[in-house]
Image (cartoon, rainbow, N blue to C red):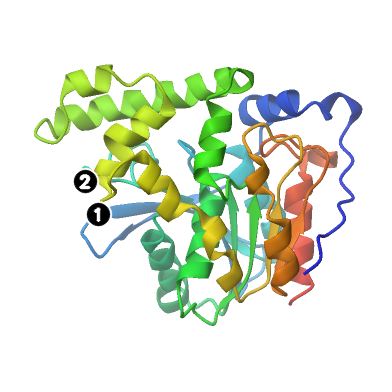
Amino acid sequence: MPVVESTYKPPFYFKNGFLATVYSGLLRRVSIEQTRERITLSDGDFLDLDWSYSKEKSNAVIILLHGLEGHGQRPYMTGAAKHFNNNGVDAICVNFRGCSGENNLYYHSYHSGFTADLHAVIQHAVTAKGYSKIYLKGISLGANIILKYLGEHSYIPLAVQAAVAVSVPVNLHGSCKELHKLKNKPFHDRFLKDLVKHLREKQQRFPDKLSLEEVNNIKTLMEFDDVYTSKAHGFKDALDYYEKCSSLQFLPNIEIPTLIINALNDSFLSPECFPVKDAKNNQKLYLEMPNHGGHAGFIDKMNIYYNERRALEFVNELR
């Protein structure tokens, strides 16, 4: 489809992408009631799902995937869940393995291209819960997982009706290089601190797989992916992981209506993360590129973010 013209106009003081990103990540608050469900995966590990519900019984549910080192209570998750709940759709905020406040059982956990757990949640929503309409929405890493899932599978359950991917690094290596630049040092260092903290816990539980010296020598996000992410999940190294898990290569195969919202002032995204050509060549793929919004910072009126409003508008056009 042709590129979608964006109508997003942020408050003046949030036109700055850095401020919008920081405010949204650290200061936004959303009040919502959630109920946690734990499901067992095929390999014996578990996922914790945080449910919230529409006031009336619904046959539709939105599955929400978080970003790197996120979880089901992040405001970009609960904000979307609340907006959909208020408009007749139940919501599942998925906590990736090890992200729900409790370590997962194995050395491996989650990564930008790990789609099996998303499929398990979809199947659970259909077979165990009986939903006939499923919408997908992801932020950043979670958005890349959704796009890769939709493009790599020859069969997508019929219940999956639409998807929305926000602030998505469709080219993982390009985005990684951006995160290593000086302009993103505060974000890079925050991500790295959290990742290494959790990796130290992994190392203590699995000392035969990783030495403390290897953990101590990690100084960048790419080194983290070289030492842990790639090796723990069957890739040769970080570059191999980025190449095989970037969703950009899967966009031509997407066959359900899918909206990508990437802000032009998102400092995490490289030029390759704005797939204009792919959108124009795929009638099911819509690309919206607002001038503002930073990384998942689409601040709007009444504490409902623009990407949350657009996601609901997008799926309602199909209902």
Instruction: Answer left or right for 216 relative to 182.
Output: left
Residue 139 % position (x, y): 59, 47
The furthest residue to the left: 208
Residue 111 visible somewhere in the drawing: no
Q: How far apart are marks 1 and 2 (CA)?
A: 6 Å
**What's the residue at 53%, 68% (across, down)?**
150
User: Disc 2 marks which amino acid?
Assistant: Leu
**What's the residue at 72%, 75% (across, down)?**
283
Find disc 1 in the rendering and name its residue. 45
Position of the C terminus by quadrant: bottom right
- Is 111 situated above or below 127? above
Element type at mark 1: loop
Residue 181 % position (x, y): 58, 22
Position of the N terminus by quadrant: bottom right
**What's the residue at 60%, 23% (across, down)?**
184
Instruction: Answer left or right for 310 relative to 273.
Output: right
- Is 166 situated above or below 21? below
Could you classify mark 2 by the number of other residues whose Cα lies within 10 Å: few (under 14), some (14-19), or many (20 or more)?
Answer: some
Could you classify mark 1 by the number of other residues whose Cα lies within 10 Å: few (under 14), some (14-19), or many (20 or more)?
Answer: few
- Is 216 situated above or below 35? above
Question: Is 169 in front, or is 315?
Answer: 169
Q: Is mark 1 in CB contact (under 8 Å) with mark 2?
A: yes
Residue 236 is marked as: none
Q: Quadrant of residue 22?
A: top right
Find disc 2 in the rendering and name its residue. 105
User: Disc 1 marks which amino acid?
Assistant: Asp
